[in-house]
Image (spheres, rainbow, N blue to C red):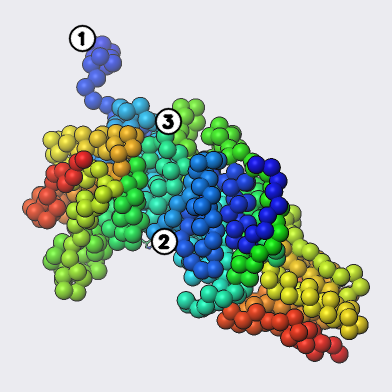
Amino acid sequence: MNMQEIISPENVVYQKPRLMNDHPMHYCPGCSHGVVHKLIAEVIDEMGLAEQTIGIAPVGCAVFAYNYLDIDWIEAAHGRAPAIATAVKRLNPGKMVFTYQGDGDLAAIGTAETIHACNRGENVVIVFINNAIYGMTGGQMAPTTLDGMKTATCPYGRNVSLNGYPLKISDLLAQLEGTCLITREAVHTAAAIRRGKKALRKAFENAMAGKGSSVVEFVSTCASGWKMTPEQANQWMVENMFPLYPLGTLKDK
Amino acid sequence: MANEIKLLKGNEAIAHAAIRYGADGYFGYPITPQSEIMETLMEEQPWETTGMVVLQAESEVAAINMVYGGAACGKRVMTSSSSPGISLKQEGISYMAGAELPGLIVNVMRGGPGLGTIQPSQADYFQTVKGGGHGDYRLITLAPASVQEMADHVALGFDLSFKYNNPAMILTDGVIGQMMEKVVLPEQRPRRTEDDIRREQPWAALGKPASRKPNVITSLELDSAIMEQNNIRFQAKYKTIEASEVRYETFKCADADYLIVAFGSAARISQKVVELARKQGIKAGLFRPITLWPFPTKALNACKEKVKGILVVELNAGQMVEDVKLAVECKVPVAYYGRLGGIVPTPQEVLEALLSLQV
Ligand SMILES: Cc1ncc(C[n+]2csc(CCOP(=O)(O)OP(=O)(O)O)c2C)c(N)n1
Ligand code: SF4
Ligand SMILES: [Mg+2]
């Protein structure tokens, strides 16, 4: 068998998702953002929704999500993506509308927009990247930062008596009548990635079926913000984040 | 629906005009003295007839971002509020200007600062025409002086904002919002189809067909060289608007020795003052800017040789008076008269201010 015979369509076992372009990615090595982007690209393409999908990008490290996926995008002000998604979906009920938001975006500055979009049961998907830190602005404390965890704005560790408690916003969103699917995923192993993709697929199907709001939280690493190697970050996430933010389905109705 | 003559409050006229214009959506949050706009829309249920979406948002911040989202897919969408709520919308207005999105915002002003009063005021002039939100941007600003103009400015505001891909504001106050007058409502226009929008707003984020590149609506550009070019493009657009879209009205100005310059409700009072002054043999006239930005600088400048004095009447501490002074290059005495905190002056007190102008 020569090289040309090997490189043929029937031998393809893996390829870059069709909707991901060749724009150089700005994410740090080991960052969860890139993997989640890939899963979203695959789900949209597999569902045949590429021409009907509108993504709402956040302010945070994923602000440039619009550079990587070949779909139409709207870049939101910090935290406002769910309000924007609300209008886009209501004005275009047949379209697939999703937001992509970090923990600061979704659970601090955008808490009101998140809760009310979910409470109205907007038929959109919220993809939530919880890395317990403000990655983009240089590693400050997030609402999800763990008790005792060091960040640029809590250099001696988060002190809950001063800063309050890590916010389990997905648990809160699961209480709302408007949400149909709330699930917590991760992308640190192949098995987790497969599970995460299934969750995304279900969320996208819910939105198209008009079942209400779906939130797919990805407990994520921020090796740079955490000042670790990618490998250490994965391990730290498993040991420290998962006990507080356990993976699994919080709500599926 | 054909043309229709109705007796309406200014706020109600805005709601009816929006439906008849074929607006796609309204997003708002209640606040006095403009709540009738959303109340009327909810009563009319346009989603059953034209398909217009009407939604009560959780805050003014959410409402303006809903407008941003709707505009980003090329839809004709609007919001309304009053002063404290408009302060909250400034973030979204700045983002709309930066992303070059059209959309209509209505401010039925009340007295401030802070929670202030629910009584009428024009104290948000600076906020509206000088910025309000961050960055070097301009907001097309219309100042209706009657219930008829409240209705007419809905169409004009949408048309101008879509012509220039720039947000537009109707800047009015509790007097015009609450007063009842006869109004001719235009005939119902159809809402545009998705095909219409894809043709007329090819930049809209409505889903990417295979035939084109992704549409991305954003105000972000980290490359300063490109961001400077973006700003230069915005400024060129603002220059075009200043050159082409100035609107104003004059009342008995042709032979006037003394000019009152006033907008909105203050102009309504001032029109009466002109009549009272003329009865006393004083040749007074009224110059009423309809667009506050672009400001009728040239037209006012042309008056500077003809009049002996100008009185600017405002329901604030003297804001537009600065633009009037600039317009006439201080070649004529320019005085200000106004009341604050929700007090509306009587024609008699304005007349006295005008008489004291006389040399
Ligand atoms: C109104 C406003 N406030 C603050 C900022 C600065 N800012 C940019 S991103 C960010 C936090 C992002 O953190 P997160 O949402 O967790 O996203 P990550 O970068 O971690 O993915 C902040 C505070 C901003 N852009 N706008
Ligand atoms: S700073 Fe953190 S979240 Fe941002 S790209 Fe780097 S690793 Fe990812
Ligand atoms: Mg984060």
Type of amino acid at the residue the image marks with label 3: Glu
Q: Position of residue A101 (x, y in %)?
A: 31, 50
Screen quadrant of the N terminus of chain B: top right
Camera-near label (2 vs 3) is 2
Task: Name which residue lies at 42% across and 50% down.
Answer: A84
Query: Looking at the picture, does residue B351 appear above or below residue B222?
Result: below
Q: Which residue is mark 2?
A: B59
How far separated are the C-alphas under marks 3 and 1? 39 Å
Type of amino acid at the residue the image marks with label 1: Met
Type of amino acid at the residue the image marks with label 2: Ser
- Quadrant of the image occupied by residue B147: bottom right
- Quadrant of the image occupied by residue A137: bottom left
- Disc 2 packing (10 Å; few <14; some 14–19; many ≥20): many
Camera-near label (2 vs 1) is 2
- Whether residue B274 is visible here, answered yes or no, is yes
Q: Position of residue B89 (x, y in %)?
A: 48, 62
**For the residue with label 3, is its CB less than 8 Å from the closest atom of ligand 1?**
no
